[in-house]
Amino acid sequence: MQVRGGFLRSFIKVAGVLVLFAGIIATRIYLFDIYKVPSYSMEPTIIPGDYILVSKIRFGPRVINVGKLIFRHELEYKWHRRSRKPQKNEIIVFNRPEYERISDNLNATIGPVLVKRISGMPGESVRIERAGMDRSYSNVFPFDTSLHWAVDHYGPLYVPRKGDTLELSGVNRLHYGSIITLDCVMAGDKGIQGGILKQNVTIHCFRFNYYFVTGDNFYMSADSRHWGFVPETHIIGKATRVLFSIDRVATWNKRFRWDRFMKRLE
């Protein structure tokens, strides 16, 4: 009886640990996750060393297809139905779309995790006009130098919305070609070949919503002005709070930034 009792207690402990780990994993997949911020692009709202809480249930969790990962060694995501759509001025965490790496494989378009603020919604036209700086007409998205756009003198640029139909004239193909190619990849469309939009495609209906994002540190942020729109499929969740913040360069007794503990992000 002692042997059986010892086995039962061990089994209960192991089962308890497994249930705990399963709960943690499920929570991080479906409810929320924590991300460390290393860059200055969202200052002063979010600063390097902040650990932010990201709600996944707000927009619907994005889940890895475990079957394909195990048996085919392919990384594929599934998006669950969301409770609501992202709103303008909300801070979101997302995978940067790798437009320069577009191929027939969606996984190649999922880049590093970034945090930015939504400044352009699907169906809106983005226009940026700021004064007081020495303007540099850099080669910004959509990489048409004839526009003479800069990061602070930008637009108007239309943000594609699901259901929008676009005729692929020369200018539209230049400005939206990479976006349309990604849209086709995500929808499993045959309008592309080898990651390139076919020339015989003359019209396109967008299957997904897109967002224009910028950093609060306006002149020090690499965002939609530099690489393009964020598709809804690449959004991880909404940044809601700074859980805590650590200053790595401060002395040991001043490293924890108490004033940022559980700070709400707006």
Image (cartoon, rainbow, N blue to C red):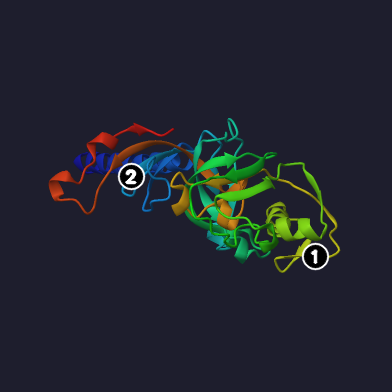
Label 1, on which residue?
Answer: 198
Q: Quadrant of residue 21?
A: top left
Task: Give the amino acid at mark 1.
Answer: Lys
Task: Residue 175: give x, y in percent of width and height.
Answer: 71, 57
Residue at the (72%, 55%) spot, across then down: 176
Residue at the (35%, 38%) spot, across then down: 242
Q: Quadrant of residue 240?
A: top left
Q: Residues within 10 Å of mark 2 (few under 14, many from 20)?
A: many
Task: Give the amino acid at mark 2.
Answer: Asp
| Residue 53 to residue 189: above or below | above
| Residue 246 to residue 182: above or below | above
Please indicate, yes or no, whether residue 18 appears anywhere in the rendered image: no
Q: Nearer the viewer, residue 74 or 204?
A: 204
Residue at the (72%, 52%) spot, across then down: 187
Q: In the rendered picture of this protein, how many numbered marks are placed on residues?
A: 2
In the rendered image, the residue lying farthest to the bottom is 194
Give the side of residue 165 with respect to residue 146, left or right. Answer: right
Question: What SS does tag 1 mark?
Answer: loop
Q: Which mark is residue 50?
A: 2
Q: Decide which of tag 1 and tag 2 comes sooner along the chain.
A: 2
Question: What SS does tag 2 mark?
Answer: strand
Residue at the (56%, 40%) spot, across then down: 119
Q: Nearer the viewer, residue 8 or 257?
A: 257
Task: Residue 205: give x, y in percent of width and height.
Answer: 79, 48
Q: CA distance from mark 1 to mark 2?
A: 44 Å
| Residue 121 to residue 192: above or below | above
Quadrant (top left/top right/bottom left/bottom right) for the C terminus: top left
Task: Residue 86: give x, y in percent of width and height.
Answer: 57, 36
